[in-house]
Every structure is written in C-alpha cells, then in structure tokens.
Image (cartoon, helix red, strand yellow):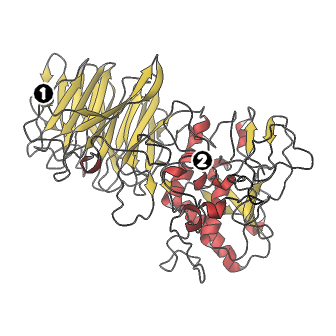
C-alpha cells in the first residue's frame, strides 16, 4: 500500500492527471489494495510500503521485488475547467443510473455550478480527452489511469451518500478525517479503524492510513487546513456514510430504499455533498488561479482543542467577535485586521480589536494577539455598535472609523501613536449603518448610510480639516452599509447592497458622481455588504457574500471590463473585507466563520472566528497539500 510519494519538478499537465487518495482501498472492508502498475516515468519517485504497518516507507524509486506501487495522490486538480465527462460500464439498473446521475447534479449544486458532470452520448467518451468510467465490476473506490482517466467502482444499489463520497475523490477530495487538524474536533473510534496486534503480547501495529492525520503546517505558520479546506464538517460525505463508527459522531446514512431520483420533498436531505463539501471543492480548484485557501487565524490551544477565537477575557466574561471585519495594509507585507467585540452582550456593543503581522529581522514571525482599542474620547457609557472600517494613505498612517451607540461616527488615527477617538457626527437623522472610509495622500472620505437609505459623505484634507457637513451623494438607495476605495487621487468607488439584493457601484471622478451600476452574477446574502479593493485605476475587485453563503468575486480591468461573478468558496459567517496592496499587486481578504460544522447537542455554543485568504500565490507549499506543489507531497 502506498504511504509516501514524492514528485520531482513535474509539469502541471502531469499533475492534472492525478486523482484522489482512495485508490484503490476505500469503503469496502478489504485490507489489501488491488495492485496496479507503477507509473513508468524517470521524473517520478515512488515509495512503497508492505501493508498497514507503521514502519517508515521505503525510499527506493523502484518497487521492491514482487511488490507493485499504487498510482494515487491525495487531492489535486484532475479535471480542467471542472468539467467531468462520464460513462457507465456494467449492467447497472435504471434506478442505479438515476441515483448516480442525481448525485452528480447534487455535486454541481453544492459547488454553485462550478462543477460540470457531462454524460457521454451513447455512453461513448471517445471524443473526450479524459473521462470517468463508473464501473459495476469494481468494488467501491477509484483509480486514475495512465492517461489521466478515472475508473471508479460503484456497486449496485449503493446509497447516494456512498456515491457522493466516491465522486468526491474523483473530483479531488480526500477523506476529511485525514486532515491534520482532525483531532481538534473529533475523536476517531479506534475499534473501527485501527488494527490489533497479530499475536497476543505483540506491540500494536499502529494506525492504518485511514487513521493517520495529514502533515502539519509548515514551521512558522499557524496550523492550517490541508487537503480539505475550510471548517471541519463532521457531516461531510468525505467521511464515511455512518460516521458513528469512525468519529464517535451521529451522522447515520439515510435509508435509500425507494429513493427518488429527482429532487423533491421525498428526497432525503443528506443525499449529497454538504455546503462545506462544495466549498472545499471551490477552494481547491480556485487555488489553481492563485487563490490561497482560507486560513483560520484562531489561537492554538493545543492539537486536540479547537482554535480559540476569544478577543479578551475568559469563561463567562469572554469577549467574542461580532459583525464584519475590516482590513488594511501600509504595503506588503504589512497587514492588520480589525473587528468589533461584543463586550456588553446585553446591549450588543463593544470595543474595537486589532490583530496584525509581527516580524523578526524582516521575516514574518507570527500573528499578534488581539489588541484592544480603548474607548478614550467617547462619552461615558458609549461603546461601538457597528463594524469598523479602516484605510491607510501611506506607510505609517492608519485611520479607523466606527459608529458608536449614540449613532455618531468616530475616528481614531495612527501616525506614530494612536489618537483618542473623536466624533465627526452623522447625517441628519443619525447614521443608519456602519461607515466606510477611503483615502489618498492627505485626504479622507468617510461614507455612511443615512436614515433615508442614501449614502452620505464627509471629507477631510490635511491642513484644512473636515468639510462642514455630511452631503448625500445621490446615487440610489441601499439596504446596508457602504464600501469604498480610492484608486487614485480624486477617484472614489463606492459599493452598496441594493434594494434588489445586487451589488451596485458608484464612481466619483473629477468631482462628479456617476452611476450607480449594478453588478450581475449573484445576489447578496441578506444583511450583507460588498467589499471593494483596488491597487490602481486600471483594476477594481468586488467581493460579496452570496446567497449560498460563499465568497464571490467580480473583477474589473481597463481592458476587459467586469469579469462576471465567480465563486471562491468559503463558509462565510459575515460580509467579506478586502484590501489591495499596491506595491505588490496583492489582494487580502478576511471574513468571520465558524471552524466546525456539526449537529450540536443543545447548549453546545460555538463562536465565529477570523479567517483570511489572499491572491496571488502560485508557489503553494506543504501546508496547502494537494494543490500545486510539485516538489514535495506526502500521502498518508
């Protein structure tokens, strides 16, 4: 059984043919794999192991005598353009085929339409470059062939969950219980998975590969997700259908007798992949466009404890995050996140907290702990009840704004040291939303939604001060807070959640406002707001939390106009925040989400935490295992 595999510098076209980690041992009770020929390539180094023992893998590139290596990989990007042609082999019943076809549709739905399963006409895929064969003559499981095709076994009368599980491997996902962070959230049932000694008194043989966690994150990095991305989902189809025997959880497989092929009220709710499964696929496939998957920035409390998301205090007095985050940068590699805490849980108000990168000798060292911003400058008894917004017009300068519980907007500035909070008032009738802020050198523009649902602005010029009052920009009415960015002096883009649930963009250039212009592609999640970023007048990026709860991206360039909305994955629990670092043309994003999805017993409360991703990175390393790291990969 293959335990370890390294790749020399392989071309991406070769890696595109590699499949997932279940070949050929999978849900069947078999203890030995069906051997396949080793891949004959001088660029590939393959190591083999003799069964399920825990001895180190052999390092020879050639298989030992009388042993064959398995052509498998954990994760990957096996299907260009996420298009998967497929055919059937074997005498499947019409119900079996209907069940399999329906599960392919559920995978398409779970990935917001990004995946495209295409059944070959007349069951003949000869016109395709690569395809999937769903084979009745094999046990459950799959193997990629030398040509990059997949031969996947699905026994007759299998449940939709089992079909979804095997298709997940074909798509490129490994088992979720092989994640390196698994022990933070679940406990494996070793009586199910782990072998006993062959003879009484002998030492344990060790955990077979299905019990082993994936490699840990690289040194110097926070523990991060590998193989599967995003929150740990105990109900994922990439576990086994009956997770009780595996993870001591209660996720029983639905009875598929009388299963209805078409989506209807009679279809079991857990027939297919979960939302987190679909998000994992999106994060995997978008990584090939340079998007680093979301990282959980919680505090490490030990390998068998969930990451901690407390801003301050502990126990009953612990302060947790609320609302949407904000992000700013003086220029790469500097980066700071801001969130509002719920210090007063009764009145849902609190302080602003900040987390930032720390460095040692110019090299990234770690993320700071959360730093509390004092309330100095606010009236007695007043705290913040909105999301913060932040901007930087130059290195060493940060301006932070938020709405206080008296419905006025307050600002605090860093220029060597932090100033006290000072009020810049609000439009007549008060501020009806959190603020937004944009800047260019020596100039600030603060936006907020007024009580009439229009956006208002107040400006600041260094050496002059604030404009006399708030003024409406008359670019429509909105249902949420604004987002704003300046790409150049005198130019501002403002985005908002329109009354039709689409994002709308207004532009000021030369002192006059134009627009607003709607962006099509996806509707916004109720109560959410868009984020907008720019590193110059030739490029703008808009990010939203879509109706499916995922991150969506729409990009404008001076040569292509708007790209159209593209799903990036993520299981967002807030609106996104975004900033573009102009010195390296890099996008940084953040959102709040939970780090564990499970049907909790009553009273088991979880809290939102800060997750972070960025673009571009085409040199992903071991802790993004299974993405695009042709230099070194480890399959456990």
Front residue of this view, candidates 190 and 525: 190
Mark 2 nearby-residue class (10 Å; few <14, some 14–19, many ≥20): many
**First in sequence: mark 2 or mark 1?**
2
Q: Which of 356 and 223 is in front in this view?
A: 223
Q: What element carries label 2?
A: loop
The image quadrant that residue 389 belongs to is top left
- Marks 2/1: CA–CA distance: 52 Å
Residue lying at 15% horizontally and 26% vertically, measured from the top left = 420
Relative height, residue 151 to residue 566 (above, below) = below
Residue 415 horizontal side relative to residue 95, left or right: left
Q: Which of 425 and 370 is in front in this view?
A: 370
Q: Residue 456 carries which label?
A: none
Answer left or right for 212 relative to 33: left
Q: Which residue lies furthest to the front in this view?
A: 201
Left or right of 49: which side holds 431?
Answer: left
Mark drawn on residue 227: 2
Location of mark 1 (residue): 467
Label 1 neighbour load within 10 Å: few <14, some 14-19, many 20+: some
Residue 444 image position (x, y, % from top left) = 23, 26
Q: Is the residue 471 above or below the residue 259 in the image?
A: above
Residue 41 is left or right of residue 120, and the answer is right
Q: Which of 91 and 325 is in front in this view?
A: 325
**Which residue appears at 52% of the width and 68% of the height?**
251
Give the x, y percent position of residue 634: 68, 41
Residue extending farthest bottom: 258
x and y percentages locating residue 363 in the rendered image: 48, 21
State how many labels appear. 2
In this rendering, does residue 509 appear at all?
no
The answer to the question of whether label 2 and label 1 lie on touching residues, with beta carbons closer than 8 A, is no
Residue at coordinates 52% horizontally, 38% vertically from top-left?
Answer: 292
- Residue 603 in sight in this render: yes
Dot in front, 2 or 1: 2
């Amino acid at each position: 059984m293959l335990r370890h595999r390294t790749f020399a510098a392989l071309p991406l076209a070769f890696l595109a043919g590699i499949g997932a980690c279940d070949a050929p041992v999978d849900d069947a009770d078999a203890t030995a794999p069906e051997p396949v020929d080793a891949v004959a390539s001088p660029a590939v180094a393959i190591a083999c192991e003799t069964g399920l023992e825990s001895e180190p893998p052999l390092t020879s590139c050639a298989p030992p005598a009388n042993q064959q290596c398995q052509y498998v990989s954990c994760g990957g990007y096996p299907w260009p353009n996420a298009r998967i042609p497929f055919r059937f082999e074997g005498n499947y019943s019409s119900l079996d085929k209907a069940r399999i076809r329906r599960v392919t549709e559920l995978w398409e739905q779970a990935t917001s339409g990004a995946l495209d399963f295409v059944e070959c006409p007349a069951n003949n895929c000869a016109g395709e470059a690569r395809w999937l064969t769903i084979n009745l003559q094999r046990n459950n499981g799959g193997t990629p062939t030398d040509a990059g095709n997949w031969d996947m076994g699905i026994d007759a009368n299998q449940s939709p969950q089992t079909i979804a599980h095997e298709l997940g491997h074909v798509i490129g996902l490994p088992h979720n219980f092989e994640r390196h962070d698994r022990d933070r959230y679940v406990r494996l049932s070793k009586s199910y998975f782990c072998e006993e000694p062959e003879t009484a008194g002998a030492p344990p043989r060790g955990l077979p590969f299905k019990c082993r966690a994936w490699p840990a994150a690289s040194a110097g990095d926070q523990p991060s997700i590998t193989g599967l991305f995003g929150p740990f989902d105990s109900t994922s189809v990439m576990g086994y259908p009956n997770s009780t025997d595996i993870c001591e959880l209660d996720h029983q497989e639905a009875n598929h007798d009388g299963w209805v092929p078409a989506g209807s009220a009679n279809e079991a709710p857990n027939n297919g992949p979960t939302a987190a499964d679909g998000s994992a696929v999106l994060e995997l496939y978008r990584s090939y466009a340079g998007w680093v998957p979301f990282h959980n920035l919680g505090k490490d409390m030990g390998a068998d404890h969930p990451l901690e998301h407390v801003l301050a205090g502990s126990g009953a007095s612990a302060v947790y995050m609320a609302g949407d985050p904000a992000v700013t940068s003086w220029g790469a590699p500097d980066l700071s996140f801001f969130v509002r805490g719920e210090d007063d849980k009764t009145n849902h108000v609190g302080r602003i907290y900040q987390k930032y990168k720390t460095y040692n000798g110019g090299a990234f060292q770690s993320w700071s702990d959360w730093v509390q911003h004092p309330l100095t400058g606010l009236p007695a008894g007043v705290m913040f009840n909105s999301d913060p917004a932040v901007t930087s017009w130059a290195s060493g300068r940060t301006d932070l704004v938020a709405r206080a519980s008296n419905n006025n907007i307050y600002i605090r500035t860093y220029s060597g040291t932090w100033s006290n909070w000072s009020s810049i008032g609000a439009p007549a009738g008060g501020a009806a939303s959190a603020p937004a802020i944009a800047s260019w050198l020596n100039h600030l523009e603060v936006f907020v939604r007024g009580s009439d649902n229009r956006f208002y602005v107040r400006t600041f010029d260094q050496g002059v001060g604030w404009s006399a009052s708030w003024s409406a920009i008359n670019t429509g009415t909105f249902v949420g807070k604004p987002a704003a960015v300046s790409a150049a002096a005198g130019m501002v883009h403002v985005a908002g959640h329109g009354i039709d649930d689409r994002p709308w963009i207004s532009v000021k250039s030369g002192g006059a406002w134009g627009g607003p212009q709607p962006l099509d592609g996806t509707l916004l999640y109720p109560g959410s707001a868009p984020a907008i970023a720019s590193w110059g007048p030739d490029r703008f990026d808009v990010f939203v939390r879509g109706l499916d709860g995922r991150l969506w991206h729409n990009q404008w360039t001076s040569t292509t106009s708007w790209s159209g909305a593209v799903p990036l994955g993520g299981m967002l629990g807030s609106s996104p925040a975004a900033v573009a670092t102009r010195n390296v043309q890099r996008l940084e994003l953040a959102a709040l989400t939970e780090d564990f999805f499970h049907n909790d017993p009553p009273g088991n409360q979880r809290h939102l935490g800060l997750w972070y991703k960025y673009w571009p990175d085409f040199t992903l390393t071991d802790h993004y295992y299974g993405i695009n790291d042709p230099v070194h990969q480890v399959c456990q």
